[in-house]
Image (cartoon, rainbow, N blue to C red):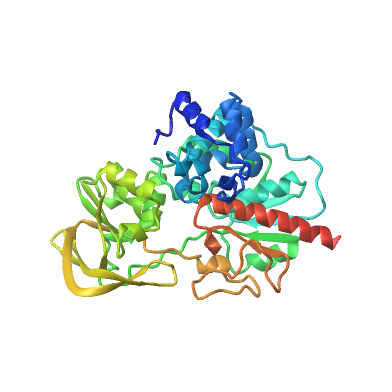
Amino acid sequence: MAPANCEASYVMQEANRCLYCFDAPCIEGCPARVNVPEFVARIRSGDLAGAGKLVYKENPLGWVCGQICPTEDLCAAKCVRGALDGPISIGILQAFACGYAVDHQLVRFHYPSGQLDKRIAVIGGGPAGLSCAHYLRLQSYPVTVFDRENNLGGLLRWGIPSHRLNRAAVDKEIALISSGLQWKRVEVGQSLPNRILTEYDAVFLAPGRWSFPPLAVPGSDLPQVASANIFLKDCAEDNVGSYDLRDKEAAIIGGGSTAIDAARACLEVGARRAIVVYRRGRREMLACSSEYLSAAEAGVEFIWVSNPVSVSKMGEGLSLELDKMTLGETDESGRRQPTPIGRRTSLVIDRVLVAVSSLPESSSLSGWPELEILSSGRPAARCTQNATVPKLFLGGDVIGAGTVVQAVADGKCAAERMHEWLSEQT
């Protein structure tokens, strides 16, 4: 794979490999439905600006998604060329074209000046909320975004480290989307939902996931045990001094992208070792293969089929006790269920970061009337209307989007359905 700042020669080489399939299964593999063959054809003809503009028609965060999308599980997984000599590097081509178009100021989102008389509120300024606001504004709806942070971006700004996502891309794409956008910094609480539902004609609820359950084993309340998500946010804010990781060893519990990102971030801030501990095997981990390979190349270590059972003090450090597991039948997630085999090991480390799961923060969902919450802690909807509150739509990580591009697609879907519903109300 070429580096993120690859040269034009590699991009042209990859563009020339595209077969420009008539039925283009790669489009079906993209949640945002970007026309891959068409934008690649424009790259091939030398029209980088046109390629970038074509991507932005379907995905207002095209540069960002080109860098971080798990393309091997999405568009590239459908690439017909893959059966010959490997899929083309769709993400790299997209990031290159979008980056060129933005850096050369060739992309502008032209939001109509005249506005309709329907007011829309978007709760959450992350990828889903920004996407929804973007597509609604293109149709002349006045939109107000509500977010708890002092900058828009959500996960893009606070949850993905710089080794994976170019900060300039985040800043520049958000600047394009937020130009002229009204947004308010506010903590979503019990009083906000009723006010929002009273004052606005439609609401898109996309507050993300900001509740991080503890490890739930003895010793998880020790000060050296912390959330990997909060650690990544502190890294983004250059506030990691309290973690005291320089020349130390850290264990990161989990098998998703957050665990991988946190492990690499530990090494970047000076940790001597970063060890990912996962209760399943490499094949079952939620992080995509490219993330795993990049982490392994960066020096991250992995302990497979091992599950934490306790954390205890050992001198100035910690002892992490692990149950060795075996993988049995598949569970509801479609992955093999880990069970203990009756053998334990221990790992002596200095810090534990927990990345086992994250759920929607209860305060961001409580107060919204008639919102059905599943046993998973997520609402029972995907960019569709709440059954009993038709002006309320949902999307993004709060309902399990999983990837940035899916969050973008959720916002796009919600904008389309909001427009249909509002049009019926006139």
Say if 220 sits above or below 273 in the image. below
Front in this rendered view, residue 261 or 54: 54
- 248 left or right of 124? left
Q: Outermost residue, front direction?
A: 84
Front in this rendered view, residue 81 or 235: 81
Q: Residue 103, how many percent across, how many down?
A: 55, 28
At x 26% / y 70%, what residue is drawn?
326
Q: Residue 41, how many percent across, how many down?
A: 60, 31
Say if 69 sits above or below 360 in the image. above
Front in this rendered view, residue 149 or 138: 138
Quarter that holds the C terminus = bottom right
Q: Residue 371, how many percent across, how many down?
A: 62, 72
Q: Quadrant of residue 2?
A: top left
At x 34% / y 58%, what residue is drawn?
283
Q: Residue 389, how many percent across, how many down?
A: 71, 70
Q: Is residue 228 visible?
A: yes
Q: Outermost residue, right direction?
A: 426
Front in this rendered view, residue 343 or 194: 343
Quarter that holds the N terminus = top left
- 94 left or right of 244? right
At x 26% / y 64%, what residue is drawn?
305
Q: Is residue 265 visible?
A: no
